[in-house]
Amino acid sequence: MFALSSILAESYTGLGQFDKARTYFHKALVTHIKHGAQTNSLIMINLARIAHLLASECDITRSIELLSFILNNAGAWDGAKIRARQLSEEFEAELPPVILESAKENGKVLELKTLTQDFINEFNPVKPVATSQAQAISDQELSLLQQVTDSLESGHLLDGNLSETEQQ
């Protein structure tokens, strides 16, 4: 399942369907973690594919950071390093030298477990609504809704009987 989701994600990246790519990368990462393979070399090739997605979305700096992480990781599979080197060479010219060097240095200190969890959270197609974003219902609105519900249940709302609270 991991490989299929990862390949689909890469295909959707190539097609420019980034939301679908993110959904399949999410599935791939969750499957990978679920099976306890935090240090498996397969995740490194997936991270290289995610770096390609980030660059395709014009987030070159994050892409270079991720590629630098792969290139400097002793546990990374050679195939992942080769892909990371190819992508890095392709995207490096798009950044000013100071930003490029900073991104490479930042990538060296990233941690696999944190990276993986961050991408799982970022690519989650079902984002939880933050409490600060949710609109709270006021006591007055709650009271009004309760009155409307009670009126509907009793059939009085149709008679036009509105209380003072409902008219406000």
Image (cartoon, rainbow, N blue to C red):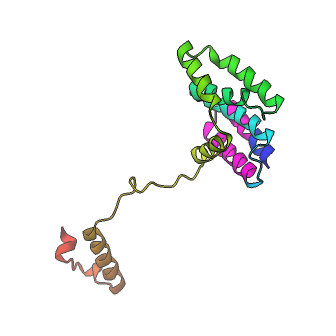
Query: Who is closer to the viewer here, 122 or 98?
Result: 98
Residue 119, located in which quarter of the rendered image? top right
Query: Who is closer to the viewer here, 162 or 76?
Result: 76
Q: What x and y, as percent, mark residue 78? A: 83, 29
Query: Who is closer to the viewer here, 40 or 165?
Result: 40
Residue 99, located in which quarter of the rendered image? top right
Residue 89 lies, with reference to residue 52, above or below; the image says above
Residue at image coords 74%, 21%:
85
Indicate yes or no whether the magenta region holds residue 131: no
For residue 112, side relative to residue 156 (left or right): right
Give the magenta range.
8-33
* Quarter in which the C terminus is drawn: bottom left
Indicate yes or no whether the magenta region holds residue 19: yes
Residue 147, located in which quarter of the rendered image? bottom left
Identity of the residue furthest to the left in this view: 164
Residue at image coords 72%, 35%:
10
